[in-house]
């Protein structure tokens, strides 16, 4: 969440060398020698210049070029996400081939959700989750209540109130309590959900100019929602200067082998510090709080100790504290 103290100097690529001439233009003709006698014509035709050694050589060159391109792309994405380094393009029209038609948080967030959600697929090809987006509100009554964010450490020794506008995305499967009703929960699927949350956040920071993004993730089947991913604009200030295709190449990767891939390891590194346990609480003045608390990574149930009510409905707080309450027990391995 802090910017590096020093930024690596940008490396200016050397100017491209002029293309090498091919075929007969590779060497200039030798100057004519007036005293030299004309050479006799060869009896057999000479071998064509640059004759391929093998008929498969062009195919090998094409595959090699593709592999080099993939390697360069992975290195570029790593530099952009981790350090903000890499080539950038100015102008909002170059940041993405798509943009929402409005910068309003109410409508723009849902347009971003509708654009991103269909690109994320389960292993069988089904869409991973449905996504709704809008301002941070608690829809526990006919008139949704605006909410504030309280962030607590795992031991609740530190509690902070987050300021600024917030976009809230709800990633919901078709099962009970928004669980994904097909496939099995896995670390690969949970990682892919975190990548989707990151893409939603980058679009929101760039086009909606919000300060914070919260994505509520689906729970494991039989559990209640408990995990959220929380991003703040300051964490990605340098990244936003680069086209999104450099940061998160499209289309998204499949779940198979995602954890062990370079992109999977990169997404894990970037999003792991942003995973929280969440619950909605009601303060004494009847205002609503979204409580985000760091999970206990050493426990079998990382969110069980952090949260206690298991409900997303605001409930009166008797302790006077905004350190919150629980919505499940499967921890950060849900999804």
Image (tube, helix red, strand yellow):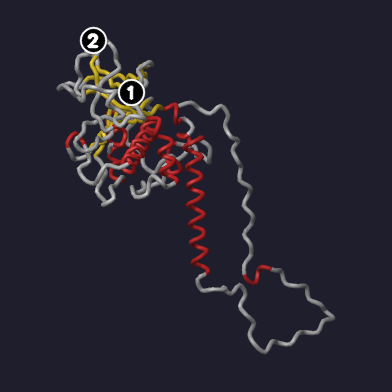
Q: Is residue 88 above or below residue 34?
A: above
Give the mark, 2 or 1, whose residue is nearer the N terminus: 2
Side of 329 relative to 151 (left or right): left
Alpha-carbon distance for marks 2 and 1? Answer: 20 Å
For mark 2, what is the residue?
A: 284
Q: Look at 46% across and 43% down and name the residue there.
A: 246
Secondary element under disc 2, as helix, strand or loop, is: loop
Quarter residue 118 falls in = top left
For mark 1, what is the residue?
A: 293
Residue 74, image x, y percentages: 48, 46
Quarter residue 40 falls in = bottom right
Residue 271, image x, y percentages: 39, 34
Q: Look at 26% across and 37% down and name the residue there.
A: 131
Residue 4, image x, y percentages: 53, 29
In depth, the one of 28 and 265 nearer the eye is 265
Side of 276 relative to 317 (left or right): right
Q: Is residue 31 above or below residue 181?
A: below
Residue 266, image x, y percentages: 44, 40
């Amino acid at each position: 969440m802090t910017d590096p103290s020093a930024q690596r100097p940008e490396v200016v690529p050397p100017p491209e060398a002029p293309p090498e001439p091919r075929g007969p233009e590779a060497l200039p003709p030798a100057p004519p020698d007036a005293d030299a006698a004309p050479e006799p014509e060869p009896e057999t035709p000479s071998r064509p210049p640059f004759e391929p050694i093998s008929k498969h050589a062009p195919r090998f060159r094409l595959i090699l070029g593709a592999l080099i391109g993939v390697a360069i792309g992975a290195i570029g994405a790593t530099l952009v996400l981790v350090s903000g380094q890499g080539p950038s393009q100015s102008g909002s029209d170059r940041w993405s081939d798509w943009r929402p038609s409005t910068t309003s948080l109410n409508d723009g967030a849902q347009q971003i959700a509708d654009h991103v959600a269909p690109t994320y697929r389960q292993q069988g090809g089904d869409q991973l989750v449905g996504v709704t987006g809008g301002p941070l509100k608690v829809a526990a009554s006919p008139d949704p209540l605006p909410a504030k964010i309280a962030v607590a450490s795992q031991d609740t020794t530190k509690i902070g109130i987050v300021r600024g506008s917030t976009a809230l995305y709800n990633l919901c499967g078709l099962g009970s309590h928004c669980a994904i009703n097909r496939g099995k929960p896995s670390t690969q699927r949970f990682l892919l959900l975190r990548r989707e949350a990151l893409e939603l956040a980058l679009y929101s920071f760039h086009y909606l100019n919000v300060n914070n993004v919260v994505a509520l993730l689906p729970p494991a089947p039989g559990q209640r929602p408990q995990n959220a991913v929380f991003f703040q604009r300051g964490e990605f200030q340098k990244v936003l200067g680069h086209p999104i295709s450099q940061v998160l190449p499209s289309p998204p990767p499949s779940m198979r082998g995602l954890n062990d891939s370079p992109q999977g390891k990169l997404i894990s590194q970037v999003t792991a510090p942003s995973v929280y346990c969440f619950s909605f609480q009601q303060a004494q003045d009847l205002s609503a709080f979204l409580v985000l608390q760091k999970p206990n990574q050493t426990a079998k149930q990382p969110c069980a100790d952090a949260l206690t009510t298991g409900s997303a409905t605001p409930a009166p707080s008797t302790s006077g504290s905004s350190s919150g309450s629980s919505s499940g027990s499967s921890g950060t391995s849900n999804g």
